[in-house]
Image (tube, helix red, strand yellow):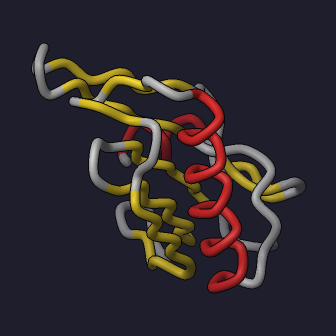
Amino acid sequence: MDAPLLTAVDVGTTKICTLVAEMTSETEFEIIGVGLEPARGMRKGVVVNVDEAGAAIRESVVKAERTSGLEIGQAMERACAAASLSCLTAGAQAGMPGRDALERHLAQA
């Protein structure tokens, strides 16, 4: 059986980072793909231009797909607003088509 995967997208004011990790044990993951892209359409952690922000997120995901050799189907997303010192995490499930992470693995991550 293939190891469970976790995919996460961190959306910040200056950069967007997409990570693809493979579970190597009950408590450890190995990063197998990374996509970094300068943030566009963001100001102080808030989306001010949806088209620009969406394009930057897509580019980050494409780079992570390229480095991991996998197609990303779903991901956890995290965006923090510096002005309010708050974070929003969206997505109860993460993974690739046919390789979903288990709920307890998401809780550990």
14 or 64, which is in the foreground? 14
In-image side of 98 versus 93 (left or right):
right
Image quarter in which the N terminus is found = bottom right
In-image side of 65 versus 18 (left or right):
right
Above or below — where is 17 with respect to 41?
below
42 or 94, which is in the foreground? 42
In-image side of 68 versus 56 (left or right):
right
The picture places residue 44, in percent across and down from the top left corner, at 21, 30
The picture places residue 43, in percent across and down from the top left corner, at 29, 31
Furthest residue to the top?
84
Q: Residue at x 50, y 60 (%)?
A: 18
Above or below — where is 21 with respect to 80?
below
The picture places residue 39, in percent across and down from the top left corner, at 41, 52
Above or below — where is 72 with respect to 94?
below
Above or below — where is 71 with respect to 66?
above
Quadrant of res 17: bottom left
Quadrant of res 6: bottom right
Q: Residue at x 55, y 81 (%)?
A: 32
Number of numbered discs visible in the structure rendering: 0
Q: Residue at x 65, y 49 (%)?
A: 55
The picture places residue 93, in percent across and down from the top left corner, at 65, 34
In-image side of 62 versus 1 (left or right):
left
Q: Residue at x 35, y 56 (%)?
A: 15
